[in-house]
Amino acid sequence: MTKKQNAPRQSKTDSNTGSKTQSAASSPAAASPAIVWLRNDLRIEDNPALQAARESGAAVIPVFILDDDAPHAPGGAARWWLHHSLEALSEQFSSLGSPLILRRGDRADCLKALVEETGAGAVFWNRRYYAEHIAVDKALKADLADAGVRVESFNGALLREPWEVKTGSGGFYKVYSPFWRSLRAMGPARPDAPPTPRKLAPPEKAPASDDLSDWRLLPEKPDWAAAFGETWTPGAKGARKRLRDFLNGPGNQYTDGRNRPDGEFTSRLSPHLAFGEIGPAQVWRETRAAIDEGAVDEKSAETFLSEIGWREFSYNLLFHFDALPDEPMRSEFADYPWRDDKAGLRAWQKGETGYPIVDAGMRQLWRTGWMHNRVRMIVASFLIKDLLVPWQEGEAWFWDTLVDADIASNSASWQWVAGCGADAAPYFRIFNPVSQGEKFDPDGAYVRRFVPEIAALPKKYIHAPWTAPADVLKDAGVTLGQTYPEPVVDHAEARRRALSGYDKIKKSA
């Protein structure tokens, strides 16, 4: 269970104003290097912590620490991404003159050891917003300040800090639409792009660094990520290309196309944002510039920005509700009559539920480390409401298999589908996997790509193979229960069962 923070909300931040903070009044001596502790901000452009370190006039030591025992350490797919992202970032820092230092172990111990080794007079980092991470950062800041080390922290992950976007009464938003209206009106805290560093002053003697290959972040036997490289180019360069390609092409069809998994209509920026290879302020500025220049359809671009807003909303919830990754925001859902269906969960994980749109999504996830957002909603609804498996099981599977695993977005979105979060979809909204497939993958192109064993079925039956006549199944080479599974559950019956469970917790509330 997530640890609770009993201090007042403002004390959770690095300062009462949310601006950059300083734990020691004096600036570091020119001879004392400055450490930039990188976490989910693996970029050089528009990186406030790096910019501040460079402007301090000190030699800059960029550092990344891998703590395998930290809360929500990277899952399997994210470790693949992390390897390639650090590889790209290391090349960038080397070209600027100051190598990236890699260390593995307890975050606090590693950072304090580096300060002692290097005689660093200052440490800079960009803030995080999960209670466990905040607690680590606060304790580190206090320890470093006691040692006379200057510490400053910045907002490098969000358009606006969670404590900046307030309701009229001064509270935090629990409904997305008014949150987005408020955030959109405010715009990013940094409306103009800062200059990109062209050179960094290196320390007189760089501290020792781990070899990235020794971390063994890449899967080997079996190499289940073998196909990831066909889809992804981790790193800031890949992120910028993704955004440009999106705004120059599918961005013009985003409003209508974003729900269609059978085409390339989305940006696929989510893993780049999750690792901070590109920041939301960069996305905002480039998208607004494209709108102003008439280079992209305004309605579609605004819809795209609203999805950046959903990410911000998720962080708003994570900051104000410590237990978001573990506990339902609506407490009555703690008593929902979930089922311990290990066989159903396994069929869902393997993409063998007998419902093609669900299976296609789960197989896309396994093959590419990513899943189309509309299909994420469909597969999540199926796990929670058709199988009655607790949403935390799905959240955990996504955490391990998504390259874009993000603690705020993952938690908030699973709670949204489950009906137990802020601004949640009503529990009685239960996606029908057949009609969802027919609506958003009308020709079955998405299903045929990821569920090839039924690819020869006519589109009339592609989303419900069990309804096909025997001769049609035979002609398509499909034998239900052998080449493709029978449905693991009857959706109509499962829907009734799910609603019955909801009625029980309503009556007990």
Image (cartoon, grey):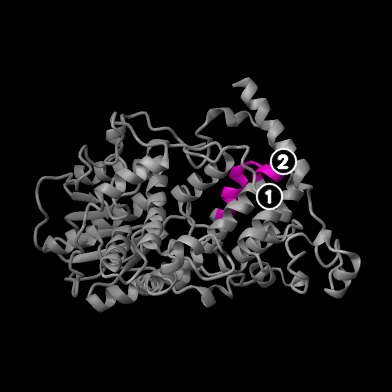
Q: Which residue is mark 1?
A: 432
Image quarter (top left, top right, bottom left or bottom right) of the C terminus: top right
Q: Main secondary structure of the magenta part?
A: helix
Q: Does the stretch in magenta take in 390? A: yes
Q: Is the residue 341 above or below the residue 292 in the image?
A: above
Q: Amino acid at mark 1?
A: Asn
Along the line of sight, the residue nearer the viewer: 146 or 174 = 174
Along the line of sight, the residue nearer the viewer: 163 or 5 = 163
Q: Mark 1 touching mark 2, by CB under 8 A?
A: yes
Along the line of sight, the residue nearer the viewer: 216 or 499 = 499
Looking at the image, can residue 93 be seen?
A: yes
Q: Does the stretch in magenta take in 258? A: no
Residue interval drawn in magenta:
384-398
Q: Position of residue 97 (x, y in %)?
A: 22, 76
Horizontally, is 228 left or right of 183 in the view? right
* SS class, disc 1: loop
Q: Amino acid at mark 2?
A: Arg
